[in-house]
Image: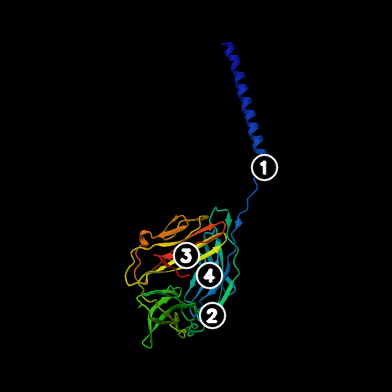
Amino acid sequence: MHDELRRRPVRRKRNATLRLVLGTVVIFGTMSLAPMPAVADTPLARPSSLQAVHVSDTGAELTWLRDGSGYQDVVERKVDGRWREYARGLYGVLDLTGLTPGTTYTFRVYTVAYKGSGFTNSPRSAPVSFTTLPGPDSVPPSKPEAPTFSGVTTTVANVFWPEATDNVEVTGYHLQQLVDGGWTTVRTVGAAERFQSVGGLTPNTSYTFAVIAFDAQGNASPRSDPGTFTTQATTAALTCRVQVISYDPGFQATVTIVNTTATPSDGWTIQFALPATATTGPAFNGVLTRAGAVGTITPVAYDKVIGPGGQITVGFSGSAVPFTPPTGFTLNGVPCAS
């Protein structure tokens, strides 16, 4: 009993000492920790190439290049010498509407960072100024260049023409055909639709087309100079054209098959000389096989039938050492034109 009483104070003293030592260690450790250096966020890239396009009497379009890491863009307008927020939630483009005719406007833009992304908002872009037209646009677009033609078959032709210009913006084109001595609009298309496929044509017949450009106010350009082509004549068998592009030791062979007959095709076979030293990849739009020095391409299911006036393109690429590209292409035994 007495021994137990004597040991208890010692145990309490040892515990107190331990608490004191632990307390000292904690306090010492806390006081010895140096503060972590602050990490500065990186600014987003400044928006660039800010410009005003398609400026009319009451509208315009702002475009710029932005940092794709940003959350959104903010456009500011300068009014009475002070910058004021004009719009936000933008991503490189802003349509301006309701502007006052004959008035000068100045804008700039910056990009807002995502919170917690490690970025800060970008610096402001260089400002851009423009003046709206004093009244409704009355200037017509420029005269388009004459249309050109490609992929002409017995019943189909592709029509293309270069872009016209305008003081504000070309909004579309009238594609016209010369019929019985008069011009008839056969198609009206948007500004970006300058490649058109025209079908329903008659074999071995000449066609003449021209183009007129127009803007949002309906101002029409002069008619382009005409362009003329002649559809292919009907033949008894399919026809083909071949192009072999060589880049020693590589090559690419492309064969265009045209159905110049009056009825749908019912399969086809392309053959050519293919050196044993040549290696090839798989054909596109066809199945390539080889036997000795002869290569053969047969159709896949969706290209077996070609309607009258229709065409498909098949081909393959490969290499040969020593360099000897494929030659002597035939379609159903008939030589292809180069």
Give the vertical position of 42 relative to 219 (above or below).
Answer: above
Amino acid type of the residue tagged 1 in the rendering: Ala
- Between marks 2 and 3 in the image, the one whose residue lies nearer the viewer: 3
Separation of residues labelled 2 and 1 (CA atoms): 60 Å
Residue tagged 2? 103
Sequence-first tag of 2 and 1: 1
* Circle 3 residue: 328
Provide residue 9's location: percent of width, then percent of height: 61, 19
Q: Quadrant of the N terminus?
A: top right
Marks 3 and 4 sit apart, C-alpha to C-alpha, by 53 Å
For label 4, the residue is 63
- Say above or below: 183 vs 72: below
Q: Position of residue 153 (x, y in %)?
A: 40, 74
Question: Does label 4 or label 2 sit earlier along the sequence?
Answer: 4
Element marked by disc 2:
loop
- Between the residue at mark 2 and the residue at mark 3, the CA separation in whole angstroms equals 68 Å
Q: In the rendered structure, are the residues bearing label 2 and label 3 in contact, judged by CB atoms less than 8 Å apart?
A: no
Amino acid tagged 2: Thr
Q: Which mark is residue 34?
A: 1
Q: CA distance from mark 3 to mark 1?
A: 82 Å
Residue type at mark 4? Thr
Relative to 333, is 139 on the left or the right? right
